[in-house]
Image: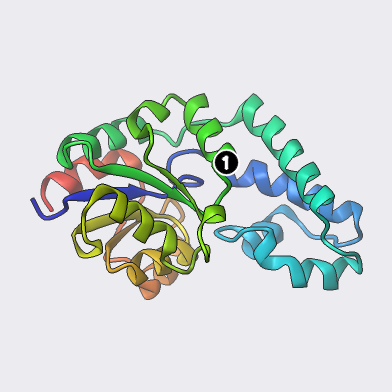
Amino acid sequence: MKFKAILFDCDGVLVDSEPMTNQVLRDMLDERGWRMTLAECMTSFVGKTVRQERAEIERRTGQPLTDDWLQSFYQRRNEVLMADVQIIPSAHAAVQAAHSHAQGRIACASGADRFKVEMVLTKVGLMGFFEDRVFSGHEMPRSKPAPDVYLAAARHLAVPGSRCLVIEDTTVGVTAGVAAGATVWAYCPRPEAGAALLQAGATQLFSQMADFPALLATS
């Protein structure tokens, strides 16, 4: 077996949450005077935490990024996700294949806060695969693109990074997986994003999660 553990990102890999989260963020930043389209917001924030962009948000809005504002964002985001978030097509079969291949040694390693990750995984019926193997960048010394969250997941599974397969969809996440010593495959439904993911260190692109089980079986 080439890979002893398989580590999944969450947003954009398992659940289609990025547009919804960024719409809430765009609206709340607009209320503070930073006007941009949803596409521009996603370009600026996908793969990063809001806290990581504190300096830019404060510069653009002219207002401090307070804990109260962050909590309001999390609350509005969670309400939207709980109502409408959807699983990435075929992600259930992909996670099942990973679980079988790695004999249960799988984890979800996200840059997002734990509450959100566990909430959306439960909502789409995937939490049962991960149980106590959810890792949040908010709980690490550094979030992605640093490797901390992937290294923590690998340590928990008692597998060296070099024997892990990471599934990501952003250059920030790919960079984190590579820095952890893992092989990184990138879920890439938009062809125009492929070059940047490969440049960041992904060794395999796939445009449909339905393709993942066959790729894993022949790896």
| 60 relative to 111 in the view: left or right | right
Q: Residue at x 55, y 59 (%)?
A: 47
Using the image as rendered, state which of residue 48 and residue 33 is in the foreground.
48
Residue 89: x %, y % from top left: 41, 34
Q: Residue at x 74, y 37 (%)?
A: 75
**Placement of 125 over or under 185, stated as above or below:** above
Using the image as rendered, state which of residue 188 and residue 44 is in the foreground.
44
User: Visible in this render: residue 12?
Assistant: yes
Residue 188: x %, y % from top left: 40, 54
| 166 relative to 126 in the view: left or right | left
Write down the residue under mark 1.
17
Using the image as rendered, state which of residue 130 and residue 2 is in the foreground.
130
Q: Amino acid at mark 1?
A: Ser
Q: Residue at x 26, y 48 (%)?
A: 157
| 38 relative to 14 in the view: left or right | right
Residue 184: x %, y % from top left: 30, 61
Counting every numbered tag in the picture gives 1
**Placement of 208 over or under 171, stated as above or below:** above
Q: Find residue 57 and report its image quarter.
A: bottom right
Helix, strand or loop at label 1? It is loop
- Disc 1 packing (10 Å; few <14; some 14–19; many ≥20): many
